[in-house]
Image (spheres, rainbow, N blue to C red):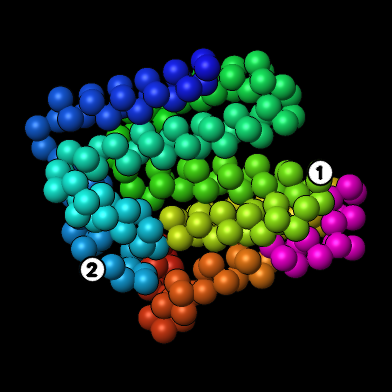
């Protein structure tokens, strides 16, 4: 009940504050609208998912201010995933403390109103961690598949997800207990699911000379 209250207040407060106090649209949100209306599989700067979300929100509501909902909502979904993982590891009360601690980090409050790729990737990173942990502990193929799907979603949000993918891969190689998973179909199911979900964007990257990576290099 406390978690629901915290998440609800988080979304309401951090949506209303910019609506009431910012006469001009945040720069990242203006960029969301500029890029998102094209609905491409990829862009020269970043992957497309956040821009799609912004354009879809505007098309559904007809209100530019509705874009301010996206960042706080992404943070709240991320909080919920972190709570689920922390509850599995440390119990419900300690999981709630973890969420309250995250509320004090600016990426989840002041910065979250500028919805863009950094904010869009938050729930995908958190749910990837949740299902990766559950896959290792429970050994269920469904958890492996969900971990792969959410990891692909992180890549659709921002290519910085390479850091997350590398971390998971290294953990599977170097942790003695995690290495046992290679004797099961789990990691291969995760890899296959990831490949299927990321395939359209990967196809675009190959056929457009990996433009976002050229942008980073420049």
Query: Are there few (<14), some (14-19), or many (20+) residues within 10 Å of tag 2?
Result: few
Q: Earlier in the sequence, mark 2 or mark 1?
A: 2
Q: What is the quadrant of the C terminus in the image?
A: bottom left
In screen coordinates, is 201 left or right of 128? Answer: left
Give 44 or 38, whichever is nearer the viewer.
38
Instruction: Describe the element under mark 1 as helix, strand or loop.
Output: helix
Residue at image coords 67%, 20%: 92
- Could you give the CA–CA distance between mark 2 and mark 1, rounded to whole angstroms? 42 Å
Query: Are there few (<14), some (14-19), or many (20+) residues within 10 Å of tag 1?
Result: few
Return the mark for residue 137: 1
Quadrant of the image occupied by residue 9: top left
* Residue 168 visible somewhere in the drawing: no
Q: Main secondary structure of the magenta part?
A: helix
Instruction: Describe the element under mark 2 as helix, strand or loop.
Output: loop
Quadrant of the image occupied by residue 195: bottom right
Residue at image coords 78%, 53%: 140
Which residues, given as a range, are shown in magenta? Answer: 176-190
Return the mark for residue 12: none
Return the mark for residue 38: 2
Across and down, in percent, residue 137 comes to 81, 43
Residue at image coords 38%, 50%: 117
Give 200 or 106, whichever is nearer the viewer.
200
Asked whether 173 falls inside the magenta stretch, the response is no
Across and down, in percent, residue 162 comes to 57, 58
Across and down, in percent, residue 14 comes to 31, 26
């Amino acid at each position: 009940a406390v978690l629901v209250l915290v998440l609800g207040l988080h979304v309401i407060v951090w949506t209303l504050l910019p609506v009431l106090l910012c006469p001009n649209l945040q720069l990242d949100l203006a960029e969301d609208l500029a890029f998102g209306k094209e609905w491409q599989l990829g862009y020269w700067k970043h992957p497309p998912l956040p821009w799609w979300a912004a354009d879809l929100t505007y098309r559904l509501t007809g209100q530019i201010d509705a874009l301010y909902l996206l960042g706080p909502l992404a943070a709240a979904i991320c909080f919920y995933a972190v709570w689920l993982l922390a509850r599995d590891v440390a119990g419900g009360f300690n999981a709630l403390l973890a969420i309250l601690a995250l509320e004090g980090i600016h990426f989840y409050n002041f910065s979250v109103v500028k919805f863009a790729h950094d904010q869009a990737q938050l729930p995908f990173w958190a749910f990837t961690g949740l299902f990766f942990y559950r896959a290792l502990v429970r050994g269920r193929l469904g958890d492996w598949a969900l971990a792969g799907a959410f990891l692909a979603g992180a890549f659709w949000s921002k290519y910085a997800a390479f850091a997350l993918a590398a971390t998971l891969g290294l953990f599977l190689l170097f942790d003695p207990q995690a290495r046992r998973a290679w004797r099961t179909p789990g990691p291969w199911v995760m890899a296959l699911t990831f490949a299927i979900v990321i395939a359209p964007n990967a196809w675009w990257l190959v056929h457009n000379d990996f433009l976002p990576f050229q942008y980073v290099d420049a």
